Amino acid sequence: MPDTPSTSPSTERSPAAAPPRTRSAQQLTTTALTALAPASWGTTYVVTTELLPPGHPLFAGLMRSLPAGLLALAITRVLPRGGWWWRATVLGALNISGLPLLFVAAERLPGGVAATLGAAQPLLVAGLAVAVLHDRPTVWRLAWGVLGVLGVGLVVLGPQARLDTVGVLAGLGHTATMAAGVVLTKRWGRPSGVGPLSLAGWQLTAGGLLLLPFTLAFDGAPERVDAGAVAGYLWLGSMGGLIAYTLWFRGIGRLPVGATAPLVLLSPLVAAGIGAALGESLSLLQSCGFALALAALLAGQRDAPGVRGVLGARSVPGVRGVLGVRGVAGVLGVLIRGGRVR
């Protein structure tokens, strides 16, 4: 028997009497499960370039969203009610319908570079959170967010012949839509009695339906879909689609928005790791920017002691933590020792 949703947002609750260690373990588990989503999205780039037919980003986005969304609706048998019809449509447009931009970036940019453009997301989320959630970011997170964008700039502006304007704009466009989707998902929560699988199903279906007419009008289906392409579409729709978005929306509901956004770090990490295994390389300048972006995203997941917010902060102690200069140098050292910097 399906649950009956109401229009009031639900909140994730943990036992009030749970000891601190138990709550920490629960948060660690939630963070680890949520991190599986951006980790799986990091595989999008290699799947797109190695398995999918080229030149069909709209069709790829449709195959990643609509079948998975319809499957989730069939499993949960819960439909939106009241205002959640338009909310699900808006969230589907932001979180799902922007997927073709991701596939455009994946086709035009090296995997590690394309994924690193997502490093701007925490800063965008922080800015939107001020306006939508009235959540003031700390000086610590803002500073590291700016450094993350700086790192992205070094990657994008590096002397790499395969970088082009369309690919960079597509990657940043997808990052912006995802940032808005994260903030609004946190703002609206979920209707009471509705689980993250239902919420994922609503958004995947709405996003897929929005993509359908554009796919039919401008993209169409590939002339030839071989076994590798079928496997790629199945992976993107299952682990990269329904499972990933269910875990992602569950995590957004349970974790602070400032802690959720930096988890997108795993997307460039996974993509760059796969790209390195396939022989991709970055220039020294791009590698420095890549390392800076990764260090900034890691540091953004924690608050510096004593930092209360932009308007009330007095000091920023602890800046020389493990994710400071030595952290950046350590990441860069790994890249150099791996023989991928040229």
Image (spheres, rainbow, N blue to C red):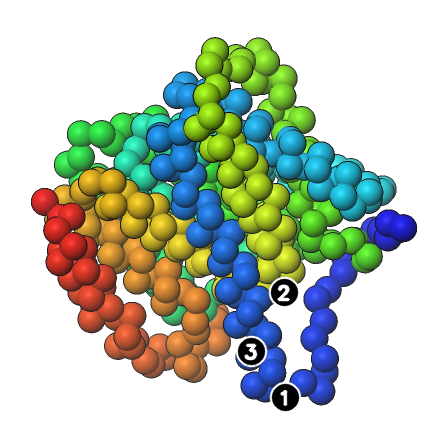
Mark closest to the chain's N terminus, 1 or 3: 1
Three-letter code, disc 3: Ala
Side of 216 where 229 appears, left or right: left
Disc 3 packing (10 Å; few <14; some 14–19; many ≥20)? few
Nearer to the camera, 199 or 242: 242
Is 322 placed above or below 203 here? below
Disc assigned to residue 254: 2
Nearer to the camera, 282 or 155: 282
Alpha-carbon span between mark 1 and mark 3: 10 Å
- Say which quarter of the image contains residue 175: top left
Three-letter code, disc 2: Arg
Alpha-carbon span between mark 2 and mark 3: 13 Å
Nearer to the camera, 143 or 97: 97
Per the image, the residue denoted by label 1 is: 19
Q: Is residue 122 visible?
A: no
**Image quadrant containing the C terminus:** top left
Residue displayed at 76% across by 43% down: 75
Three-letter code, disc 1: Pro
SS for dot 1? loop
Residue displayed at 48% across by 71% down: 309
Residue displayed at 66% across by 45% down: 200
Residue 11 drawn at (x, y percent): 73, 64
Per the image, the residue denoted by label 3 is: 25
Mark closest to the chain's N terminus, 1 or 2: 1
Alpha-carbon span between mark 1 and mark 2: 18 Å
Residue 176 drawn at (x, y percent): 47, 41
